[in-house]
Image (cartoon, rainbow, N blue to C red):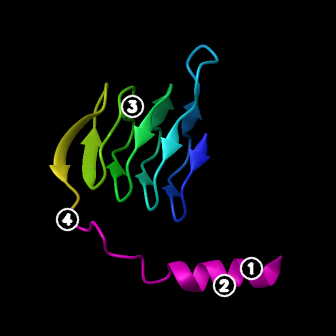
Amino acid sequence: ARIGEGCVFFGNNTIGAARFQGSPQLGRHVVIGAGVRIIGTITVGEDTYLGANAVVVDDIPSGKVAVGIPARVIADNPERGLKNPRFDEIQDSLKKSL
């Protein structure tokens, strides 16, 4: 899988290929709720929220909120384009610790 900068995972997630063909691509600043499964050659656009336990089997465009099994878009992300104010601080702290 390719995971963009600033993605947040809330745990117990599965991200992988379906039958060894292709891998998921996550854009920048994707928020992935607990228990989300992303399976196959999937593209999840930047600034996207995936709700808890969603199963993503199709592409999700940028700036959306998707939930369910299978995951479907239910709304635009109202925070699209807003940067996490602590992202730079966290990134700098990690760089110093390495």
The x, y position of residue 52, in whole percent, is 37, 43
Q: Secondary structure at mark 1?
A: helix
Q: Residue flagged by tag 2: what amino acid is it?
A: Asp
Marked residue nearer the N-terminal end (3 or 1): 3
State the mark number for residue 78. Answer: 4
Going from N to C along the chain, the mark reached first, 4 or 1, is 4
| Image coordinates for residue 67, horizontal then vertical, percent | 28, 39
What residue is shown with label 3? 56
Residue 92 colored in magenta in the image: yes
Residue 3 shown left or right of residue 63 in the figure: right
Mark 2 in CB contact with mark 1 (< 8 angstroms): yes
Q: Residues within 10 Å of mark 2 (few under 14, many from 20)?
A: few
Which quadrant of the figure contains the C terminus?
Answer: bottom right
Q: Earlier in the sequence, mark 4 or mark 2?
A: 4
- Label 2 belongs to which residue? 92
**Residue 97 magenta-highlighted:** yes
The residue lying at 64 percent from left, 18 percent from top is 20
Residue 14, picture quadrant: top right
Figure quadrant of residue 19: top right
In the rendered image, the residue lying farthest to the right is 98
Q: Of the residues shown, which amino acid type is indicated by label 4?
A: Pro
View extreme (top): residue: 19
**Considering depth in this image, is 63 or 55 the residue closer to the camera?**
63
Q: Callout 1, which amino acid?
A: Lys
Mark nearer the N terminus (2 vs 3): 3
Query: Where does residue 2 sit, x and y in percent of width and height?
Result: 59, 45
Residue 80 as seen in the image, left or right of residue 44: left
Residue 58, horizontal then vertical, whole percent: 35, 28
Decide: is 38 above or below 45: above
Q: Amino acid at mark 3?
A: Val
